[in-house]
Amino acid sequence: MLAALLAALLAAAGPGPGDALDGRPELALPSTEAPAPSPPTALVVPERRRWFALPVLFWLPETKLGFGATAGIHVDVTGAPRTSSIFAAALYTLDRQGAIDVAGDFTLRGGTVLAGRARAVHFPDAFYGLGPRTPSSARERFTRRSIEAVADVGFPVPGLPHLRAGPRLDLRAEEIRDRAPGGQLDSGPIAGADGFSAVSGGASVAWDTRDAPLWPSRGSLAQLWYVYAPREIGRGGGFGRGALDLRHFFPLGGGRVLGVQGYAEGTHGEVPFTLLPKLGSSRFVRGIREGRYRDRLEWAAQAELRLPVRGRISATTFAGGGDVAPALRDFSLRTVKVSGGAGLRYRLTDEGANVRVDVAASKLGVELYLLVLEAF
């Protein structure tokens, strides 16, 4: 099945008109699988591919089978030190989940980076409770409908060419529907169970020496951000959120790269449960569905070995672990979750926008991921 899907993708992802144009790289869009039946041997790879636009067929633990369309483009701003990118998707799943999602980052001539994301979501989901020991039997269904926009401006720091810092703005409005009668969200003291709206402001700082933001072969990224939503603005404010993201990529020769990442996220105040740190997703501890474990604090770590196979095709193997807890003193080695797996990549653009197929296993089972852009 996977071979057939990959063959269809290879045949459909050919060049667009000319060599002209072609992510927030954190945008984990579901896969760009296209149904064209032509064999991969018919593929003609252009010298320069900077954009794509494809129908998609995707699979994630949180959505199962879904479909839609996705597109991406890379643009060079005159005098800018690196390429700018934007990605978009319109998606729907057989579980009646839908999303419109746009994300991008733009590097200006002086090195200032403008990053942002906007999306609207209708998402039947599952809640298992809070903490690192929630049982599968605690699962209850709910539906969240939300709109959100995040903007981040990174100004270069004089004398430190790889360091950027600047303001961050986060706008969100959400309503919760279809709560299970008598469940935790319906009757328990769970913040955000009745929905919320919030305007969060703060700052971010990043040190970035990677040779490319989407598919790095060397260099490091260290990013720290924090935002606070005052109670006086919106409905259900009075909470803060922040995260630290550390990555490094080791070139091993022959096109092989070892990437490692450490991530920590924390919150305080009356944080809506949908904004609490979540362990398990297409990015952290693959093999566990997103939101399976959530609490006020989270840590995660992972490593991924990337290997060239042929042309635009690469392979990966990865392993990771992490946990959540209500406070630092509550973290325990006995509740750490681990997972691992392997995958294939097909490079849609020369800048490294990839389709990825990952199979990951944890103690909860085996999960399949078909989507666009990397875990890190």
Image (cartoon, rainbow, N blue to C red):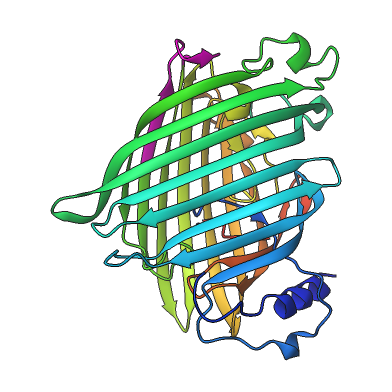
Q: Nearer the viewer, residue 194 or 191?
A: 194
Which quarter of the figure is the N terminus placed in?
A: bottom right
The residue segment tinted magenta is 224-238
Residue situated furthest left in the rendering:
159
- The location of residue 303, given as percent across then percent down, is 52, 59
- Can residue 368 be seen from the camera position used here? no
Vertical placement of 171 versus 53: above or below? Answer: above
Measured as percent of width and height from the top left, residue 234 is found at 51, 15
Q: Which residue lies at the image location 77% right of the left edge and 78% below the top edge?
A: 7
> Does the segment drawn in magenta span residue 46?
no
**Residue 228 included in the magenta stretch of the image:** yes
Write down the quadrant of residue 10 in the picture. Answer: bottom right
Residue 71 in picture, x, y percent from top left: 62, 61
Residue 122 visible in rendering: yes
Specify the farthest residue to the front. 17
Residue 175 in the image: state x and y as whole percent: 68, 22
